[in-house]
């Protein structure tokens, strides 16, 4: 009887040790996987970079426009760019800023032809090329909507120091928290500066006009 109890006890300890080693292995492996993922910088960190020019802003991208055509950053050389990152389901700040970009171009008249506005989605899951085609038509006829794979969008956003994060709001629903800046790029694709959210067209005009005269 005692030998049987000892055997059962031994088996129980073996099971406990096996479970413990399994848990330890899973914990270590999960930690290694997390360590391999690049750390996403906070909105404050990215804002600090932009304010003090600590790193280059802007860079190469290859995305799909709202007509289904592949567009690269080099396609827009020779134009000043107003680049905006957002998403079409944004309830307030995105449409407000896009409307101010539209007002800026309208007030420039023919001079506005030297500027190319770009809207790059941070929600490629919902913002397909077809969907963006309808959305950008609500603003300016020359506004180009850009989408792509999640990886391509992340690459473009990281280059422009854009913060964004998908936030679940309920069953099968979500929103996207994001920084909302209008980036100004020169004719060679170099970063000139940015406008913060809710910048009125009149303020944009005072900054943009001198760059229109520079060749």
Image (tube, helix red, strand yellow):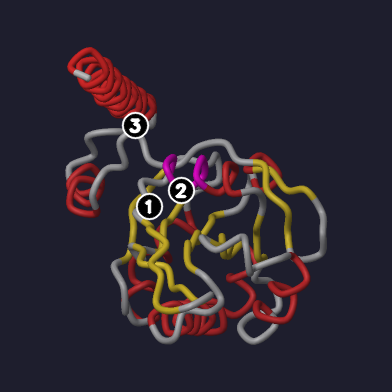
Q: Is residue 172 above or below residue 193?
A: below
Question: N-terminal of the two: label 2 or label 3?
Answer: 3
Q: Is residue 17 above or below residue 30?
A: above
Tell me, yes or no, whether the two marked residues, 1 and 2, touch with CB atoms within 8 Å: yes
Q: CA distance from mark 1 to mark 2?
A: 5 Å
Question: N-terminal of the two: label 1 or label 2?
Answer: 2
Residue 115 seen in the current view: no
- If the image is split into quadrants, where does the N terminus sit? top left
Tell me, yes or no, whether the two marked residues, 1 and 3, touch with CB atoms within 8 Å: no
Picture quadrant where residue 57 is located: top left
Determine the secondary structure under disc 2.
Answer: helix
In the rendered image, which residue does mark 2 sit on?
A: 157
Residue 207 position in % (x across, y down):
34, 65
> Would you say residue 187 sits in the magenta stretch?
no
Residue 214 position in % (x across, y down):
47, 50
Crowd class of label 3 (few under 14; some 14 to 19; many from 20; radius 10 Å): few
Determine the secondary structure under disc 3.
Answer: helix
In the rendered image, which residue does mark 3 sit on?
A: 34
- Left or right: 81, with 29 as reference point: right
């Amino acid at each position: 009887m005692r030998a049987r109890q000892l055997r059962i006890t031994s088996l129980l300890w073996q099971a406990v040790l096996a479970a413990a080693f399994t848990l330890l292995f899973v914990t270590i492996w999960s930690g290694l996987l997390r360590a391999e993922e690049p750390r996403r910088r906070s909105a404050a960190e990215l804002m600090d970079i932009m304010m003090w020019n600590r790193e280059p802003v802007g860079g190469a991208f290859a995305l799909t426009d709202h007509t289904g055509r592949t567009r690269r950053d080099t396609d827009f050389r020779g134009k000043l760019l107003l680049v905006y990152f957002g998403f079409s389901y944004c309830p307030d700040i995105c449409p407000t800023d896009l409307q101010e970009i539209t007002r800026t171009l309208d007030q420039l008249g023919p001079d506005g032809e030297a500027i190319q506005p770009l809207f790059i989605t941070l929600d490629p899951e919902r913002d397909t090329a077809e969907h963006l085609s309808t959305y950008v038509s609500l603003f300016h006829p020359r506004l180009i909507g850009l989408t792509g794979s999640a990886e391509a969008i992340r690459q473009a956003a990281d280059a422009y120091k854009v913060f964004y994060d998908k936030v679940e709001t309920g069953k099968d629903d979500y929103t996207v928290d994001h920084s909302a800046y209008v980036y100004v790029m020169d004719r060679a694709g170099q970063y000139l500066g940015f406008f913060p959210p809710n910048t009125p067209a009149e303020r944009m005009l005072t900054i943009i006009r001198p760059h229109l005269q520079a060749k």
